[in-house]
Image (cartoon, rainbow, N blue to C red):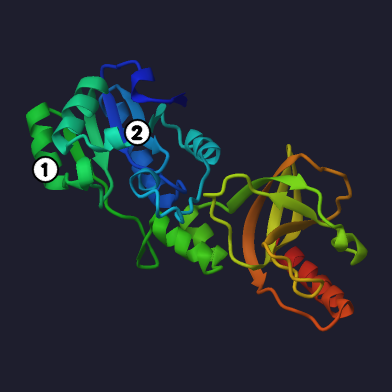
Amino acid sequence: MKVHFGIDEFETRQNIALTIGTFDGVHLGHKIVLQNLIKQAKKINGESVLLTFHPHPRLVLYPENNDLKMLNTQEEKIELLDKTGIDHLIIHPFTREFSRLSSTEFVRDILVNKLNTKVLITGHDHHFGRNREGSFQELNELATLYSFELEKQPALEIESINVSSTKVRTAIQEGDIGKANTFLGYHYQLMGEVVEGDQLGRTLGFPTANIFVKNHHKLIPPVGAYAVYVFRNNDKFKGMLNIGKRPTIHNVSKKTIEVNIFDFDNTIYGENIVVEFVEKIRDEKKFDDVHLLQKQLEIDKNKCLNLL
């Protein structure tokens, strides 16, 4: 997959099968769209292209509402999309000026004249152009006018639920990691830098790596304990992770993310690690003393080992 940071970086091809969207999470519904995109590209002896935007349009259009949390960082999204087999990813800078293009201007100037689109595949709820004014009906009329094929991809349903990025976010925010992973088709992950903590975990017999997530738009699961996989370079480990304020030891003002990596005792300050969430095992709880906390951590570890 070739990555192009802007529409102008993309050299025009003869036959393009295109889809558009933020594709946050690259969940199972997205993957069905991309599989169809690849299929349509082969039919026209052309290439498959995904046009997406950065930053997320809501962050540009509604900067005062900055609580939007994303399932993927840009780096994570590129890595996930690379695995789908599409030919090209265009990440176009989303600006207020770009948002003012009318639906007709967007189709004529961008999709047709710049990208030479021959087949366009849209999601079931796709709107486009200024103020999302463009409907599928209008897009159908423009397809006839500018001679490209148009196809609407129906929503994927799992257990009678339409899979969407919003539903994945909701599942994670509710601590239902299992449901989120089912919708995603992979384990939800965080990447962060290991920073120095107060080393209280070591005194309990459960040394932890404190993780700092740099991207403040990345969605962090809620307070609680989780069974996780931990990736350091090419090595994979099992572990248990806690998100919270450590009420038994002392309440901290900000939530910490600490992972106890099983069968691991290296010093890794300053390194980046990836954590994959498998299941939430319990809520955070304040214990009457440290010994009760240690007993609970032993129970948690056994539960995680069974899950993993």
Residue lying at 44% horizontally and 47% vertically, measured from the top left = 24
- Which of the pair 251/68 is nearer the observer? 251
Question: Left or right: 147 with respect to 119?
Answer: left
Q: In this view, does 114 lie above or below 246?
A: above
Q: Is residue 128 above or below residue 228?
A: above
Question: Left or right: 166 with respect to 42?
Answer: right
**Residue at mark 2:** 51
The alpha-carbon separation of the residues under discs 1 and 2 comes to 20 Å
Question: Left or right: 13 with respect to 240?
Answer: left
Kind of residue indicated by mark 1: Glu
Residue lying at 56% horizontally and 63% vertically, measured from the top left = 177
Q: In which quarter of the image is residue 45?
A: top left
Kind of residue indicated by mark 2: Leu
Query: Exactly how many numbered labels are in the figure?
Result: 2
Instruction: Provide residue 249's location: percent of width, then percent of height.
Output: 82, 72
Q: Is residue 269 above or below residue 294?
A: above
Instruction: Provide residue 129's location: percent of width, then percent of height.
Output: 21, 40
**Residue at mark 1:** 138
Q: What element carries label 1?
A: helix
Instruction: Provide residue 94's location: percent of width, then percent of height.
Output: 36, 35
- Crowding at mark 2 (Cα within 10 Å: few <14, some 14-19, many 20+): many
Residue lying at 35% horizontally and 50% vertically, measured from the top left = 62
Q: In this view, does 194 lie above or below 54?
A: below
The image quadrant where one finds the C terminus is bottom right
Q: Residue furthest front?
A: 64
Q: Quadrant of residue 161?
A: bottom left
* Mark 1 or 2, nearer chain start: 2
Question: Left or right: 197 with respect to 307?
Answer: right
- Which of the pair 51/278 is nearer the observer? 51
